[in-house]
Structure formats: structure tokens, C-alpha cells
Amino acid sequence: MDLAHGHFGEFGGQYVPEALMGACAELSVAFHDAWSDQEFRDEFSHVLAEFGGRPTPISYCARLSQETGLEVWLKREDLAHTGSHKINNVVGQALLTARMGKKRMIAETGAGQHGVASATAAARFGLECTVFMGEVDTIRQSLNVFRMELLGATVVPVLSGSKTLKDAVNEAMREWVTCVDDTHYCLGSVMGPHPFPEMVRTFQSVIGVESRRQMLDIAGGLPDVVIACVGGGSNAAGIFSGFEKDASVKLVGVEAAGGAAVSNGKPGILHGMRTYILDDADGQIIEAHSISAGLDYPGVGPEHAAWSSTGRADYSTAHDDEVLDAVVKLSQLEGIIPALESAHAIAYVLREAGRELPRGSRVLVNLSGRGDKDVAQIREVLAAR
């Protein structure tokens, strides 16, 4: 991987307007300088420990294991502050924003979890915060909109395109062009132009580092399979990074069946990166669909594209009905209500137990977020079944 130039094999890169080349170059230098500074890394770890709730535990799912014939463990990112893995990345980027002498962060959000985490970190470090969110997502995630506003952020509904995550990214990047001198774009996933994919994965790698140690210490050995949901792919990249060099560990990313850029897409350019994208014969982006607002993205992080192309990770899909069934199953068997995004990974476990996942396999699932934000939507959809 040529990370010096932001490439993961043939994927990645920096396809941005000339007006953003300087900002990306500045950010790359600032990030690499910060990450090579032990003081910065110590502060990052300290804030995640005393504010972010790290380390998060792993939980053995006795009843789910009995039902599936597997040994199922969960990495509990749902127990991190703000309710998901997103806090890891935004703490790092907020510290970097302050280090660069900038006073404001902007962010995009789909399900609202990155927006909430960004607003939280901005409040913690005294930064201004503006969050762009597709109008459709502001409606289905209205609780998270209120949380962001309560934390002091300004939420800007995006009315263009499909009014979802893709369009929120578009608006955030347009805004960044106009205010790079005093504003940092806190991108929420392992996507976008260099250095964002590398930077976000680096901040999220704390998940993989903890998971590997915990599996050895608590579960008694490495997992046979590590499974995580994939939209842009930051939670998956974070946990996969801890096991990437372990040849015995299979890595599985689970996309929303209504999108699935890895499973159904082809190489192309989107949001400043070369990756797998969903487009039509004329090269126009096809809108993705998912019951989860965080996975309806028509692309994927370039490192995931590279992992798929080399065979290091496998990618599958889960349909909305399977996801809803997984929410109910995990809730009633283990007393844990997962986010709709995370439930895609659980759905894969339920469907593939005894098939792609041989009986007795030790399986680690990244439970990337809790389902509090989704319960109103879940109640409505289940009632309509």
C-alpha cells in the first residue's frame, strides 16, 4: 500500500478540485506530524479513556451461540460515549483541529451518530460545529438532530439529490472549499481524498488493537472470523486492522443489499477517491437504499475496495427484513438492542451459521452502535409488517 500518496493498490488517491489540494496537503502534513508525536497520541488515548469510555468490553453471547452453534462474541462499541465507534475518530480529528489552530469543524452525517460525536467533541474542546445532514435522514433520525443541537451544533438539512448521506458529503465538501483557512472538515468514515481514509482508519484502529488483546486474554484465542457492517466502512476498517496480518482470521464486511458498492459496484471516482461505486451506463451515481441511514452510501472506503480485490476480506449483504429480524433476535436473546447498521453483521451471522460459518467457529462481531436512535423507526416498520 502506497500510503505516502494515499493509494491502497489501485484505489484511493486524491481527486479534488484545485481549491482543495492545499487543504488536503496541509491536513496530510498535520496528521502525520501529530501521529508521530507521542504527546499527541498520549492525549488521544487519555481523552478516549476518561471521556470516550475506552476500552470497550467484549461480550460472550451464550444464548445466541447456543442457537447458532457458533461461539459468538461482540465488540461493544455501542458502550462508547455517544453510543457508537464514531467518538474514536472525532476525538482524534478534534485534537488535530485544535493543533492546526482552527476554530471550527464541519461534518456530514447519515444516521446522525457521526454528527452527534462531532458535536460532542466540539463541545468538549470549545470548537464551533456545523453538521450537514440529508433532509430524509433528519426526519428518520430526528432524535439525533435534537442531540446535535442540544450539544451546540448547527444542523443544516441538505435538500439536493436523494437528501441522504451522499448529498450531505457533497454539501460538506462544498462548504469546506469556502472556509479552509479556519475550518476543518471532520469526515466521518474511511472514505474521501487522501489523507482521510488513512487518518480515520488510524484513529479507529483502537478497536482492532483492543479486540485482538481481549480475544487472546478473555476468549482464549484469536477469532476464526471477524464480521462488521460496511457503509463507508470505518468501524470495519478499525476492527479489521487489528487482525489484517493474522492469516488464520477471516474478515467479512456486510453491506446493505440495497446498495453494496463492493458486491455490486465497479471502480470509479466518488468524493475525491477511486473506489468501488454504484453508477449507471452513463456514469451517473445510482442512489443506494438501506433501512439504516448510515449504510445508504453508493461507494465504499478505498481500503475496503483493496481488501476485496486482493481477497483479504470477503463482502456480503443483508436485506432489510433480515436486519429487522436480527434486531429482534439480539434484543430478545442477549438483552442488547443493536443499531440498524450493526444489525447487518448480526443478520449475516444468523443466516450463515452452519454454512459460511462452520459450526463451532469462534466469531467476533463489531457491534458498532446501539439502537436507541432507531427504536421509533423500528417500531413503525415492525408494526407495518
Image (cartoon, helix red, strand yellow):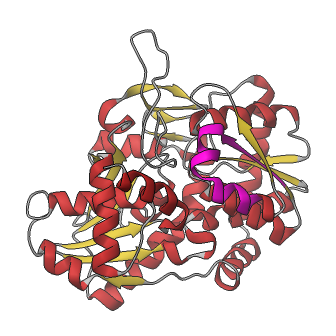
Residue that extends furthest to the front in the rendered view of this protein = 383
- Where on the picture, by quarter, is residue 282? top left
In this view, the residue in front, 152 or 9, is 152
Q: Is residue 199 above or below residue 55?
A: above
Query: For residue 130: magenta?
Result: yes
Find residue 170 and report its horizontal and vertical position in percent. 67, 31
Find residue 195 and report its horizontal and vertical position in percent. 64, 45
Find residue 223 and report its horizontal and vertical position in percent. 26, 74
- Where on the picture, by quarter, is residue 323? bottom left
Q: Is residue 28 above or below residue 274?
A: below
Residue found 22% across the figure and 82% down from its top: 63
In this view, the residue in front, 267 or 151, is 151
Q: How many marks?
A: 0
Residue 110 visible to an observer of this rendering: no
Q: Is 185 positioned to the left or the right of 289 in the image?
A: right
Q: Is residue 216 above or below residue 212?
A: below
Residue 131 visible to an observer of this rendering: yes
Residue found 16% across the figure and 58% down from its top: 352
Find residue 153 and report its horizontal and vertical position in percent. 81, 56
Q: Is residue 110 above or below residue 366?
A: above
Q: Is 3 positioned to the left or the right of 278 in the image?
A: right
Residue found 35% across the figure and 74% down from its top: 331
Query: For residue 305: magenta?
Result: no
In this view, the residue in front, 148 or 176, is 148
Q: Is 31 positioned to the left or the right of 288 in the image?
A: right
Q: Which residues lie in the magenta part?
A: 129-148
Residue that extends furthest to the top in the rendered view of this protein = 282
Is most of the magenta stretch helix, strand or loop?
Answer: helix
Q: Is 254 positioned to the left or the right of 196 in the image?
A: left
Residue found 8% across the figure and 71% down from its top: 359
